[in-house]
Amino acid sequence: MTDLWDGISRAIWMVLSLDANLLEITLRSLQVTLTALVVASAIALPLAAFLSVRRFRLRRSVIALLNALMGLPPVVVGLVVYILLSRSGPLGVLGLLFTPTAMVIAQVIIIVPLIASIAHQSLRDLWAEYHDLLISMNVSQWQKITTLLWDARRALLTAALAGFGRAIGEVGAIMIVGGNIDNATRVLTTAIALETGKGDFALALGLGFVLIALAVLVNLAIHWLGRTEREGRW
């Protein structure tokens, strides 16, 4: 019990004193996850808008596939990316395995379906309101998409934050493709797993406190955005 409280007190001190190791790992986590979020949003949001305004034969199948991929096991994603980027894989010549870029690729694959599915639900409802107006104005498909994306920006930010929350807490895929290399690919979740295994509970708890704080901030932001969006409609 004494060791536990000692670990907790040391972890709190590491957070408050901005321990160099803890800060480095946190900043790398944010760099990887925010990069993945920007790339995933650039793919998922226009895709969600396109699925809202365009009718085609396989549209329902694509939407169902996106919803199904929301539950895609991250370790499977990590395995697939590992195979593609390994020396014997088709993209092995790029030398991306065990780099932050490989971790970004894995996170993008994981969160694109989540962001696209959440965004599509909001854009679909907005399109029902805007359909007659935009059709009567005879605007192009691109103008319809950009109009929906702009007017639903708060809801889309909520979708993006949900993707961030999923990515920042991911451990399986990035452990496989990143390798958890010190000063290179070690991030919050992989470092927590490593330090716990080593018995260094102080650093593991410190990193855990940071991860919990990020998760709480994301959820508070989602709640605030959802509330302001509802108030804006009234």
Image (cartoon, rainbow, N blue to C red):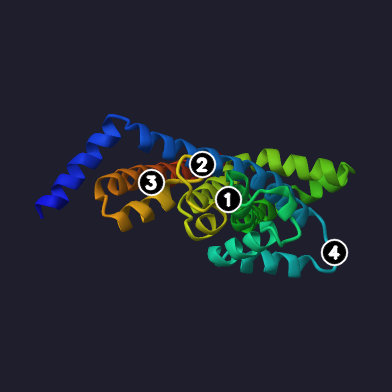
Of the 4 image quadrants, the one containing the N terminus is bottom left
Residue 155 lies left or right of residue 231; in this view the side is: right
Question: How many residues crowd mark 1 within 10 Å: few (<14), some (14–19), many (20+)?
Answer: many
Label 2, secondary structure: give it.
Answer: loop
**Label 3 or label 2, whichever comes before in sequence order:** 2
Label 3, secondary structure: give it.
Answer: helix
2 or 4: mark nearer the eye: 2
- Residue 162, percent across and down? 52, 50
1 and 4 marks in contact (CB < 8 Å):
no
Question: How many residues crowd mark 4 within 10 Å: few (<14), some (14–19), many (20+)?
Answer: few
Residue that mark 4 sits on: 56
The answer to whether residue 234 of the structure is visible from this angle is no
Residue that mark 3 sits on: 211
Number of callouts in the render? 4
Alpha carbon separation for disc pair 2 and 4:
45 Å
Q: Mark 2 is on which residue type?
A: Ala
2 and 1 marks in contact (CB < 8 Å):
yes
Q: Nearer the viewer, residue 217 or 121?
A: 217
**Label 1 or label 4, whichever comes before in sequence order:** 4
Alpha carbon separation for disc pair 1 and 4:
40 Å
Residue that mark 2 sits on: 184
**Label 2 or label 4, whichever comes before in sequence order:** 4
3 or 1: mark nearer the eye: 1
Residue that mark 1 sits on: 98
**Label 2 or label 1, whichever comes before in sequence order:** 1
